[in-house]
Each structure stands twice: as C-alpha cells, then as structure tokens.
Amino acid sequence: MLASGIHELEKLSLLLDIGTNTEVFIGNSDDILSCSCASGPAFEGDHIRHGVKAVTGAIERVSISQDYEVTYETIDDAAPIGICGSAMIDVMAELFKRGIINQHGRFNTSVKTSRLRKTSGELEFVLAWRDESGTDVDITITQSDINKLQLVKAAIFAGCSILMKRKNISLETIDRLLIAGSFGSYINPENAKIIGLIPDLPIEKIQFVGNTALSGAKMALISMDARKMAEALANKIRYLELAMDPDFHREFAAAAFIPHKDLDRFPSVKKLLE
C-alpha cells in the first residue's frame, strides 16, 4: 500500500497484490477499503500437476492456434519443465478462446486434437510433448488443474466486486488498476480479463507495480516519514472480512464461470466471443 501511492491520489484506484493470499484495496486519499482473498498457492505451482515456480525451464507464455497447436516460451529459453503462474492464466484464456473449455471450465470433448485426451480417467490437454520437455514426460493441464484455477480467480474477482459494492462505486469510476506481487508484472492483462481474474478495464488503465511489499518495507527502513505514514495507513484503512459478507458466496459462485456467469460484466470478452 505504502509503495503504491494510492493513498495520495484523488482519483479512485484498485490495487491487487496477488500471492498465496491476495490483498485487494480500493480507494483514494479520502478512504481505502480492503479485503484478503484466500487465493491459495496454485499460481505458485502448488497442487497443479505440472505446476512449478518461475524457475529456469518454466513455461511462462502460451498461445494456442485455431488448429489447436501450442506455442510457448520458457524462462531462459530452456526445455520446458512445467507451468508457472503467468502461463496458467494464458493457458486458461487460450483454451477458452479456442473452445477447448467452456464457460464452466469443462473440456469440450467434441474438439478433435491429439492434445486433448483422457489419462487415468481424467481429461487433460498436452502443452508440451515428452520429446520436447526437460522432464521426459508430457507436460499437461488437467481438468482438476483448471477447476483449481477457477476457484483462485473467483476468489480474487469476488473480492474486487464486493469492495466496489460496499463503497458504492461502479467500474467506470476506477481510474487505474494496479497489479502487484512477485509475478504480477509477468501477467498478460488481456488474458487475465478473459478468464475473469481482473475486472474488465481498458488496458491503458492497468499498471504493473512489482513487489510493493518489499518496496514499502525498504521505504519504511530508510525514512522515518515513510514509517509514520505506514502507521497512519494501518489505522486509516478499513478492512472487510470477505467470508462474512452476505454477498460473498453468490459473488464467488458467479465468478467461478469463465469469465463470469454474467457476461455483461465483461463486455470486451463478450465481444470477442461473438
């Protein structure tokens, strides 16, 4: 919060600090409301079959062509060893755009490609074949992987939605969306919108601000004024217990769809699908 500077601005900002727990802040110099979303460790590779952290060989960018062929980039251009958080967002968006998964996140079994198959009773899509991988196995994303990622993105979007509702503001009044976190700057914002991870704001309003927790800690270490401001912010920021909010379960369930149960909340994605 301290490093983001949203507490100094007159216009409204939305700040997402994405991690195992995603912190959401919305406000300006007058008032800031916050919540914490239990987004879990999926974007850090945990509980995803071929999930890895952002290390050498991690797939970090993915695109899928109309004939279902996969193009990817890996960290340090090494042979792929798994999928890191930024690629998970790309994969979900690309699968959805190509009709390989539907709005419920389920695989479309009518799609004809050798990449979509059933292994040990579960559907999966092959991103990298074993002869090109660095692990001597096919690198895939499974149905259960997609379902876990849906829960993550639903929690984050529900947090944004409820904070806007409690502050009685519309998406149009948000001047900018700041994305923080250790891997935030590697996210493709268009794909993040397509899956419903972030609100459907124009790309020019989206900014990546890096590891603001670390930056803020450094500011407080070297500046007494910054330390006093951090203490003042801790007392000023209002906190909403998300799980206790009466609208949370409804918002969460609606946000579990791709991008959302109500497509009118994602007009740019709706237009893409027409």
Image (tube, rainbow, N blue to C red):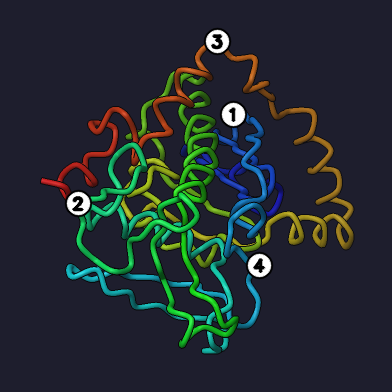
Dot placed on the residue nearer the N-terminal end, 3 or 2: 2
Residue 91 lies left or right of residue 162; in this view the side is left
Q: Quadrant of residue 191?
A: bottom left
Check contact, mark 1 vs mark 4: CB within 8 A. Answer: no
> What residue sits right under mark 2 in the picture?
110
Dot placed on the residue nearer the N-terminal end, 1 or 4: 1
SS category of the residue bearing label 2: loop
Check contact, mark 4 vs mark 3: CB within 8 A. Answer: no
Dot placed on the residue nearer the N-terminal end, 1 or 3: 1
Q: Residues within 10 Å of mark 1 (few under 14, many from 20)?
A: few
**Nearer the viewer's eye, disc 1 or disc 4?**
4
Q: Quadrant of residue 84?
A: bottom right
Dot placed on the residue nearer the N-terminal end, 4 or 2: 4
Q: Residues within 10 Å of mark 3 (few under 14, many from 20)?
A: few
Q: Point out which mark residue 273 bears.
A: none
What is the distance, in whole Å, between disc 1 and disc 3 at their CAs?
26 Å
What is the distance, in whole Å, between disc 4 and disc 2 at their CAs?
33 Å
Percent of width and height locating residue 255: 42, 32
The residue depicted at 64 percent of the width and 14 percent of the height is: 244
* Amino acid type, callout 1: Asp
**Nearer the viewer's eye, disc 4 or disc 3?**
4
The residue depicted at 34 percent of the width and 40 percent of the height is: 258
> What residue sits right under mark 3 in the picture?
246
Q: Nearer the viewer, residue 78 or 125?
A: 125
> What residue sits right under mark 1 in the picture?
30
> What residue sits right under mark 4 in the picture?
53
What is the distance, in whole Å, between disc 3 and disc 2 at their CAs?
39 Å
When the figure is inspected, residue 58 is found, relative to residue 188, above or below; the finding is below
**Nearer the viewer's eye, disc 3 or disc 2?**
2
Check contact, mark 3 vs mark 2: CB within 8 A. Answer: no
Q: Nearer the viewer, residue 96 or 270?
A: 96
The residue depicted at 66 percent of the width and 44 percent of the height is: 40
